[in-house]
Image (cartoon, coloured by chain):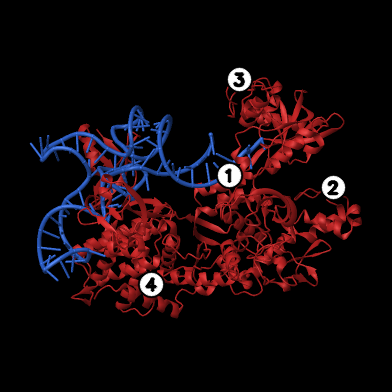
RNA sequence: GCGGGCAUGGCGUAAUUGGUAGCCGCGCCAGACUUAGGAUCUGGUGCCGAGAGGCGUGGGGGUUCGAGUCCCUUUGCCCGCACCA
């Protein structure tokens, strides 16, 4: 009986589907386990061999957990709103829903071939109105809440207006925009529009004027994490800064909790660190400088983390966009400041970065008073100060800040060193160490002592206070695009009003074209009658991360019509136990999801404060390109080893017609018409291709489609080979060379069950050696899976098979547990063998075999040994001696022997389970 | 510039976490069975050396009886952030 993987895989995939083998329900009799993959965006190119890496790992873990008796939730769905479908629609006029559906269908076919144990009855698609109803609902909840810093949670807007009515906003500590103080009386006298515009400053989802990343090529704004180096992440178009009124989510309110709770999750340190950097907490002080423009005096607030350097603050700098810029510009300086502002505004973000090293700035004409030295210091305007961070104004300490230093050198401003012995002739001294000098009462202190001492003094003198600043900004939530969730909001007399829950979902309307209108309005402006009760609806749509922020909750209860997730389902499944996905979501999805979840947690809709308990980032699979070498001016191709004798051009060749770097000559001639009459210069009768690691992409002809691997080797081989390639979290190139080894293993495994071509396993009892092989494997597989070390698991299987082949073992007692062990990795072949062993139900209901220690025990025990309180090594004491109650032994392992041979050691005293001494 | 990570045979990797470096697989070499093999099986395969033996985990130094593993230093590569005051 040959191992016919095509037939076997087809048969069992149909079986799982028909029997709904992997459908799960809440079941309080079993412990739950929730394994989630980051759901894919269904792109038109389909899956390549790199995409399923994480899915295979999570599937192995899910199947393993099932074998361990857990009720496993393992769902899949699609992040289906997105830019590519929309751009394809703009080009072709085809509705994005159509292309998306087509892509999803293709993805599903490809996924099914790999044999994943997903519960497809829970599938979600973010573009499905039944799904995005809950995205819109969450938005409305955010619209209807504000963030109370005192209670550290979101509370209802009605609770806020109640307070306003009673006492105004004097005692409110909210995370909010700029709001003036008002009394209850004043509040009550405001008209509806005034009240609404104040409330808007408090809402968690709010409409606000902000400087945004505007991408003219895409015609939309982008979030910070969608922009990289001044270019859009999708498409790489230039991005510029623009002031616009946009929907935003008050993510910044949660900055502290997002930071703190990183301690509660099991993520890699590097990923946590990325989030910490993104949140960017910095502790310092807010300080007021009085500034005069010659006619009027103002109090300008700055933020600093180095209050200790106040004596060296020799000038002040404002961001060009700062609200103070205008007021502090004197008549004499008006013209040059205007010129500077216009130039700064015209620069795109990218240009501003490119010119980062160039020092630019302009004197405002105003002077501030350094509150500690009493000196008059000039106020400058420069774009190295950002309006969006801190207060948009800084005190410049050129001696101890490299940017201030460059600026001071360039404009010839005074530099005062504040740390004893520091050399500032060439560059500033930024390190926070040393003894203070030139600093009045701070002299003689270390920097570490001076920082708090300076802030204490600032507070005592009433010049400012301690303050924590975050880099994390509110998320801009509007996109001027078609293919996204419509906002359930309409405008009545210019005031944003929420739709009622009963009106959800607000479905995406049909439009004639997917482009912005001629007047520059978003595509939804093209929709006929895009109104609610006669009032205009919001024309922007939500960004990509809207739909992906709470999808893991929807999987828990995907068909619930009245709630995002029912209480019972949520209390049972709680949160994701294991989340596997790429590290590229570190500062996007993974922040937004945590924020979204915390918000719902505050409102009592979910019971866990963190959505993803353990997170694993699978590495990227790069492409491994192959090259042929064409002799210049001919259609001759020279093999890799001989190419140095010729002048050649290196050309990519489709990796699918290359096997182990050997070119299939006939396939090559057929590949492209140009090559049909190609000639070859071979080495040892073969054409050897060169290779390089590159990104997997069509243009490099290095895309490997998993379907082809499934055709040639089967899904089980694909699954095991992807795991065998190396550690899960490591990036590595896909290299089909070597897949034969894994395939061979499966064929051997199969052959163990067949004698004389017939399925036959022996019922004899296993020998000690056979049991040892099995139990070593059980132990290894268990610990490897639990530590996600799947590559070493595959090796362990190979070792076990080799041992059994050598012994010639085909005993049921050994083979049946082995089938169970292997089933998470190679489910199809194992189902087949399981059924041939006489079982009628799926192997996924089997029990992970118990490990029996006595089967693997050597005739010895190992003890840690300490010598003179310093030396550590291991010592082996024969079990027979131990059984006889012997507590003394004069035996150690090879290393110890080697060492002991040189020393005058007489015997080693072993106290079982305790400390060991060496006697001389 | 700041932060994090990595470096082991021709290649992908492994190493009980401080204890015989190189498991498993690819590739390669030899052999068996074969009309044949891109099938299967057996043996070999870190480097130098005929051998005994010597040398070996990017380089240098250190701790230790013992270092791929820990510390310092240096080089190279990868990733993230980047005018964040």
Q: Which mark is residue A588?
A: none
Same chain, marks 2 and 4?
Answer: yes
CA–CA distance in space, label 3 to label 4: 72 Å
Residues A855 and A906: in front is A855
Local SS, label 2: loop
Foreground label between 3 and 4: 3
Mark 1 — residue?
A: A277
Q: Which chain is blue?
A: B
Question: Which residue is labeled 3 in the image?
Answer: A420
Viewport quadrant of the C terminus of chain A? top left
Q: What chain does mark 1 sit on?
A: A
Mark 4 — residue? A846
Identify the colour of chain A in the image: red
> Going from the N terminus, do you reach mark 1 or mark 3 first?
1
Report how far apart the C-alphas of labels 2 and 4 lie in the structure: 67 Å
Could you say where residue A385 lies in the image, as x and y percent from the top left? 68, 37
| Circle nearer the N terminus (4, 1) | 1
Depth order, front residue of A364/A580: A364
Q: Earlier in the sequence, mark 2 or mark 3?
A: 2
Q: Are marks 2 and 3 in contact (CB under 8 Å)?
A: no
As drawn, A238 above or below A467: below
State the image quarter where residue A114 is shown. bottom left
């Amino acid at each position: 009986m040959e191992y016919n993987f095509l037939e076997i895989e087809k048969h069992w995939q149909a079986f799982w589907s028909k029997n709904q083998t992997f459908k799960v329900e809440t079941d309080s009799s079993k412990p739950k386990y929730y394994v989630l993959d980051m759901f894919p965006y269904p792109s038109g190119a389909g899956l390549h061999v790199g995409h399923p890496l994480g899915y295979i790992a999570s599937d192995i873990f899910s199947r393993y957990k099932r074998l361990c008796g857990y009720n496993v939730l393992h769902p899949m769905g699609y992040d289906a709103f997105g830019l590519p479908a929309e751009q394809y629609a703009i080009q072709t006029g085809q509705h994005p829903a159509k292309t998306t559906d087509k892509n999803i269908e293709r993805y599903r076919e490809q996924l099914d071939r790999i044999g994943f144990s997903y519960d497809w009855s829970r599938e979600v698609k973010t573009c499905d109105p039944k799904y995005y109803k809950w995205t819109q609902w969450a938005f409305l909840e955010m619209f209807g809440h504000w963030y109370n810093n005192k209670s550290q949670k979101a509370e209802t807007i009605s609770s806020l207006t109640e307070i306003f009515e009673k006492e105004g906003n004097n005692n409110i500590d909210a995370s909010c925009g700029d709001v003036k103080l008002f009394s209850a009386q004043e509040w009550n006298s405001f008209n509806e529009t005034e009240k609404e515009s104040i409330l808007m400053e408090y809402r968690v989802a709010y409409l606000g004027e902000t400087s945004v990343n505007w991408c003219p090529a895409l015609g939309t704004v982008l979030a910070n994490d969608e922009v990289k180096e001044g270019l859009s992440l999708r498409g790489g178009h230039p991005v510029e800064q623009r002031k616009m009124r946009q929907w935003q989510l008050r993510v910044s309110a949660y900055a502290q909790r997002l930071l703190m709770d990183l301690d509660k999750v099991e993520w890699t340190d590097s990923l946590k660190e990325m989030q910490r950097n993104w949140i960017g907490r910095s502790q310092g002080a807010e300080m007021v400088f009085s500034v005069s423009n010659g006619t009027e005096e103002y109090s300008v607030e700055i933020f600093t983390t180095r209050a200790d350097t106040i004596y060296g603050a020799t000038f002040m700098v404002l961001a060009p966009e700062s609200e103070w810029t205008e007021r502090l510009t004197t008549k004499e300086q008006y013209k040059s400041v205007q010129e500077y502002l216009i130039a700064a505004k015209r620069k795109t973000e990218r240009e501003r970065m490119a010119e980062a090293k160039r020092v630019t700035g302009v004197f405002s004409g105003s002077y501030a008073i350094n509150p500690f030295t009493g000196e008059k210091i000039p106020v400058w305007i420069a774009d190295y100060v950002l309006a969006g961070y801190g207060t948009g104004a800084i005190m410049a300490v050129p001696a101890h800040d490299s940017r201030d230093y460059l600026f001071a050198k360039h404009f010839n401003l005074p530099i005062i060193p504040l740390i004893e012995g520091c050399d500032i002739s060439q560059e500033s001294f930024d390190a926070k160490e040393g003894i203070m000098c030139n600093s009045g009462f701070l002299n003689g202190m270390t920097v570490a002592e001076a920082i708090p001492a300076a802030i204490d003094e600032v507070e005592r003198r009433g010049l400012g206070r301690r303050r924590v600043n975050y880099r994390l900004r509110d998320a801009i939530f509007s996109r001027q695009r078609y293919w996204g969730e419509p906002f359930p909001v309409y405008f009545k007399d210019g005031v944003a009003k929420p739709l009622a829950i009963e009106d959800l979902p607000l479905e995406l309307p049909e439009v004639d074209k997917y482009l912005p209108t001629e007047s520059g309005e978003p595509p939804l402006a093209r929709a006929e009658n895009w109104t609610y009760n006669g009032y205009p609806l919001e024309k922007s749509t939500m960004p990509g991360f809207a739909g992906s922020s709470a999808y893991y909750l929807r999987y828990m209860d995907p068909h619930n019509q009245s709630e995002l997730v029912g209480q019972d389902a949520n209390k049972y499944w709680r949160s994701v136990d294991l989340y596997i996905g790429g590290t590229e979501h570190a500062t996007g999805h993974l922040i937004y999801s945590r924020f979204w979840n915390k918000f719902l947690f505050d409102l009592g809709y979910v019971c866990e404060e963190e959505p993803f308990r353990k997170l694993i980032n699978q590495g990227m699979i790069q492409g491994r390109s192959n090259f042929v070498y064409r002799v210049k001016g001919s259609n001759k191709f020279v093999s890799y080893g001989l190419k140095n004798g010729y002048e050649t051009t290196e050309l990519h060749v489709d990796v699918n017609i290359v096997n182990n770097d050997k070119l299939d000559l006939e396939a090559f001639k057929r590949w492209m018409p140009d090559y049909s009459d190609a000639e070859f210069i071979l080495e040892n009768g073969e054409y050897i291709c060169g290779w390089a690691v590159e990104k997997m992409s069509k243009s490099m002809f290095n895309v490997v489609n998993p379907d082809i691997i499934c055709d040639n080797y089967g899904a089980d081989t694909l699954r095991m080979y992807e795991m065998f390639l190396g550690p899960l979290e490591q990036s590595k190139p896909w290299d089909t060379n070597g897949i034969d080894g894994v395939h061979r293993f499966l064929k051997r495994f199969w052959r163990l069950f067949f004698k004389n071509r017939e399925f036959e396993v022996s019922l004899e009892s296993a020998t000690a050696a056979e049991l040892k092989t099995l139990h070593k494997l059980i132990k290894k597989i268990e610990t490897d899976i639990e530590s996600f070390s799947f590559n070493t698991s595959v090796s362990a299987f190979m070792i076990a098979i080799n041992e059994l082949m050598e012994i010639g073992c085909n005993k049921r007692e050994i083979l049946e547990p082995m089938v169970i062990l292997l089933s998470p990795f190679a489910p199809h072949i194992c189902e087949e063998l399981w059924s041939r062993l006489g079982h009628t139900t799926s192997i996924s209901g089997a029990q992970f075999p118990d490990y029996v220690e006595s089967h693997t025990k050597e005739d010895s025990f190992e003890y840690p040994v300490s010598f003179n309180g310093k030396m550590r090594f291991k010592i082996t004491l024969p079990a027979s001696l131990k059984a006889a109650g012997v507590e003394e032994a004069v035996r150690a392992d090879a290393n110890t022997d080697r060492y002991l041979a040189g020393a005058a050691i007489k015997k080693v005293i072993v106290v079982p389970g305790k400390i060991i001494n060496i006697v001389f």
